[in-house]
Amino acid sequence: MAEFEPKIIAFMCNWCSYAGGDLAGTSRLQYPPNARIIRLMCTARLDPAYVLKAFAEGADGVLVAGCHIGDCHYVSGNLKAEKRVEMLKKLLPELGIEPERLMLRWISAAEGERFANTMKEFIARIKKLGPSPLSAGV
Amino acid sequence: MAEDKEKGEKGTKNEEKEEPRIGVYVCHCGINIAGVVDCKDVAEYASKLKNVVVARDYKYMCSDPGQQLIKDDIKEHKLNRIVVAACSPRMHEPTFRRALEEAGLNPFLFEQANIREHDSWVHMKQPKEATEKAKDLTRMAVARARHLEPQQKPKVKVEKAALVIGGGVAGIQSALDLADMGFKVYLVEKTPSLGGKMAQLDKTFPTMDCSACILTPKMVDAARHENIEIITYAEVEEVDGYIGNFKVKIRKRARQVLEDKCTGCGLCAEACPVEVPNEFDQGLGVRKAIYVPFPQAVPLVYTIDDEACLGCGMCEAVCGPEAIDYDQKDEILELEVGTIIVATGFDQFDATRKPEYGYGRYENVITGLEFERLVNASGPTGGKLLRPSDGKEPHRIGFILCVGSRDAKVGNPYCSRVCCMYSIKNARLYKEKHPEAEVYIFYMDIRAYGKGYEEFYRQAQEEYGIKFIRGRPGEIVEDPKTKNLLVRVEDTLLGLPLEVELDLVVLAAGMEPARDSDKIQRLLRLSRSADGFFSEAHPKLRPVDTLTDGIYLAGTCQGPKDIPDTVAQASAAAARAAIPMAKGEVETEPIVAFVRKELCIGCRICERTCDFGVITMVDRKAHVNEAICKGCGACAAACPTGAMQVRHFTDEQIYAMIEAALRGDVEEGGKEEVKAEA
Ligand SMILES: Cc1cc2nc3c(=O)[nH]c(=O)nc-3n(C[C@H](O)[C@H](O)[C@H](O)COP(=O)(O)OP(=O)(O)OC[C@H]3O[C@@H](n4cnc5c(N)ncnc54)[C@H](O)[C@@H]3O)c2cc1C
Ligand code: SF4
Ligand code: SF4
Ligand code: FES
């Protein structure tokens, strides 16, 4: 049987994490190809509904990545995202989704390696968890 | 059908309502993408997506012919949305937006799928998966493109004044250049005088000019310049706003000496009974509690060191012009500037972090900067190099290179670029005065890359008889009686362990990011590279810009460099900063919040969420002050009804991408003139 290949949606801020992904690219760091990145200007834009929408559409995992605390281009956008992710982690079990399927990471524009490692780690984690209870029916 | 090219701005309304006609362009980027991703297959796939009228793949989309392809298609096929699947939008989005504009299409009707940095370069061994991913990313981009709307870039006036932070040689050069171009410059320096590290140096390689002799005239020029306002003993506390209109708060610390009255005569310092170590001499000499850091200080105004001062009143008693004011308070200055240049320099690596060399424990182990002060005529020993332990002239000196550089163990894998050269300089200086002395240089590799540097190094070897030993010393042991030093090193050329007894060891402590880089980073929202220095916007093509528009980098705050490179970069930063100021206005991003009034229920959640006070309530509906909105989107994410949105990042656009990413199926094919060709 073919190995389970999870579908992952990643929301990343333009200034740090998306750029960290670019650096991983210029540095030719290799990581598994499961994630599809959606660029936001700041993680502050992350409407919790986006995460729910992603799970409802069959995502097996959702990764949110932004600037390190204190480095957000809009000062505290990432703090707001952190609160929203915490809130979502409490909510997800109610919908039958393991909270581990949602991950928040701070990745700076200089951290290509951290970017690649985060991808590896998160994808491995979701592989272990198996298909999302919601995606199974899709 | 819209005639978008003729209508330009007016076309706005029509384009919103009309059916999207999308052109998709898949770039090979030579073999960068095509070597992994099957670009033809991706283009063919894209041609079947709904609303896609044309889909092509091409070798280099960013090239002139590549852009022309887009422009021709816009005209021929009446395209009103463009998707390019290529490198990162952070790379070429501006290029393609311009192409749209040139073809009469609003530049925001463009979307880029990143199939290079986020795909072909990171999945090099998985061509099949990478091609699938490229299709997904293209489909997501097409989905978003359907919902894109034209945007107008607001224009803002640019204040014709610049702030330069840091008064080392970099900051001074940038300030002089901008001032000569006719712009007002505020030059802010943390310490009581301009000059930075260069003021502390004795001679400079490879020409052996006296450092102060070439620096002090520049300092004086800056002080005399009618367009430069020097603000010393001061630090930036707050920076608000954006390119064109930065609002800056500066804390000018109380010197307790009135700048306009002090004549710099120095009677006060003579009278002052308190002596403390002088930072300018690396703590080797002393200064008074009321002091100037060095005789040529600019401004030549005394400063009372609050921590050392006893409040005895001696200085006040002797000061003729009544310049002393013990009650002086810190002053907060508020400035408005159009651009900012960061020139905060470097700090020397703390050599105690290499305990095997005994710095801080062995008296006769000193750093390069300490050596510079000890051989300098205005230094603590009047220019005579004496051993700290016994005040005798050393006969055997060793210079150890790469201390805290090229050393992953202390977290600094980079080369500091000046230590080889300044150590050779100092070795030569000593040999010139003491031809009989034994001088050793312990090196890993000699990096003499600059103009005249290799020649300078060769001479040191061949004409000066300085002994170069290749090897990084493992440890230094002090003889407790003589205080002589035993250097243990493996000579990697001979493959032999050596022990060399020396009277004095000079550590070439490398360059590190200035200690308060964190603070500056936060104030200006800069990013830093892995080495901790501030990052430029692009390592090759935008080496002095930062990713924050209107903020530029000069000198060693961006990375280790010598004086010639520092000065060149400082002039470059000034030239870059001058562009928006000379133009007088810049276009800014239109990515700001807006309200769909019909959905707003007046709950005020957005108002509370915004950290920048952008939102007010007008007639019980949210109202956005676009001029100050930063476009972070926090309000939109908090709004319970979807009334609050961000331009170019609307809910529809993002939902469309999520759906496209996860619903793998190809949507209804584009009907007419479907093309997929190279
Ligand atoms: C021992 C030694 C010997 C050297 N010899 C040579 C040589 O012979 N030839 C050569 O070409 N190069 C030499 N160099 C390199 C040279 O010193 C640097 O290239 C040069 O000083 C860099 O200038 P800068 O303006 O970038 O930084 P700096 O000289 O570090 O100046 C930075 C300035 O910014 C100020 N500052 C920092 N933070 C703030 C803040 N937050 N707010 C306001 N102000 C701030 C600092 O007080 C300082 O005045 C030597 C370096 C060392 C360590
Ligand atoms: S986008 Fe950010 S800055 Fe603009 S109004 Fe919303 S919260 Fe405030
Ligand atoms: S949060 Fe939304 S509904 Fe509430 S006031 Fe703001 S825009 Fe209106
Ligand atoms: S800009 Fe990166 S999290 Fe706000």
Image: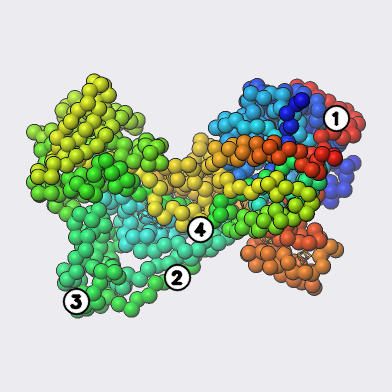
Question: What SS does tag 1 mark?
Answer: loop
Residue A97's disc is none
- Distance from disc 2 to disc 1, alpha carbons, whole Å, reads 63 Å
Rendering coords of residue B198 (x, y %): 30, 48
Figure quadrant of the C terminus of chain B: top right
Residue B116 appears left or right of B218: right
Q: Is residue A81 above or below residue B387?
A: below
Is label 1 in contact with label 3 (beta carbons under 8 Å)? no
Crowding at dot 2, Cα within 10 Å, few <14 / some 14-19 / many 20+, comes out as some
Identified at 41% across, 72% down, the residue is: B331
Q: Is residue B596 left or right of residue B609?
A: right
In front: label 2 or label 4: 4
Secondary structure, mark 3, is helix
Image quadrant of ligand 3 equals bottom right
For marks 4 and 1 on the same chain, the one whose residue lies earlier in the sequence: 1
Q: Is residue B450 above or below residue B266?
A: above
Labels 2 and 3 within one chain: yes
Q: Position of residue B366 (x, y in %)?
A: 22, 45
Q: Which residue is mark 2?
A: B332
Residue type pointed to by label 4: Leu
Q: Chain of mark 3?
A: B
Q: Is mark 4 within 8 Å of ligand 1?
A: no
- Which residue was labeled with disc 3? B314
Amino acid bearing label 2: Ile
- Label 3 CB-ligand 1 distance < 8 A: no
Asked whether the residues under the numbered discs 2 and 3 touch, taking CB atoms below 8 Å apart as contact, a structural biologist would say no
Residue A115: x %, y % from top left: 59, 40
